[in-house]
Amino acid sequence: MRVVVMVSGSGTNLQSIVDAVKAGQLPTEVVAVGADKPCQGIERAVAAGIETFLVQPADYQDRPAWNRALEEAIAAYRPDYIVFAGFMRIVDAQLVDRFAGRIINTHPALLPSFPGAHGVRDALAHGVKVTGLTVHLVDSGVDTGPILAQAAVDVLPDDTEETLHERIKLKERALLVKTIGQLEASPSNPQF
């Protein structure tokens, strides 16, 4: 299975995928890592010998032009799946439609609860005792796509947004790798 991984930050989810591939636990080929800005995730990809690309919004006249450039950059690698691994940009419906049912995202809450950019903060503010993470397919909404997998994380009495998010990230890495492995085993992997 050919995968393009998109990152915006530290690339810890990317690293978990790369490590699982290297260990023979995930029979997936990461054909490229893309980003919307220079970041540690790109550095991790370079260190692993994976081809990289940058599609920075500031280089385009508007969001539609950026989305078309990103769409073409991804399509050039003919991926079976695209993994948004900490990719912090909302893409448009045309890009989602082109890769329909093949864009995987993670979210630090048990969707449909607490969608959006502040899932951990929102869960804490709401006073929940259990939150977690979701691996889901991307659709044209914000964190509304079909759920592939979820894992629960207890909220501890002294949790801060940072401590809770770190515990969520630990489970997130493992669940993302497991979910990609399950998709790899599925009988149908059409290319774009």
Image: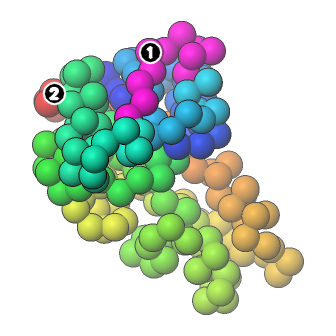
Q: Amino acid at mark 1?
A: Glu
- The answer to which quarter of the image holds residue 92 is bottom left
Residue at 37% across / 18% down in the picture? 31
Toward the viewer: 41 or 167?
41
Height in image: 154 above or below 28?
A: below
Toward the viewer: 70 or 101?
70
Residue at 39% across / 75% down in the picture? 112
Q: Amino acid at mark 2?
A: Gln
Callout 2: helix, strand or loop?
A: loop
**Residues rendered magenta in the picture:** 45-55
Toward the viewer: 132 or 119?
119
Height in image: 12 above or below 130?
A: above
Question: Residue at label 1?
Answer: 51
Residue at 49% across / 60% down in the picture? 107
Residue 20 rendering spot, x and y as whole percentages = 56, 25
Location of the C terminus (image quadrant)? top left
Q: Residues within 10 Å of mark 1 (few under 14, many from 20)?
A: some
Height in image: 106 above or below 49?
A: below
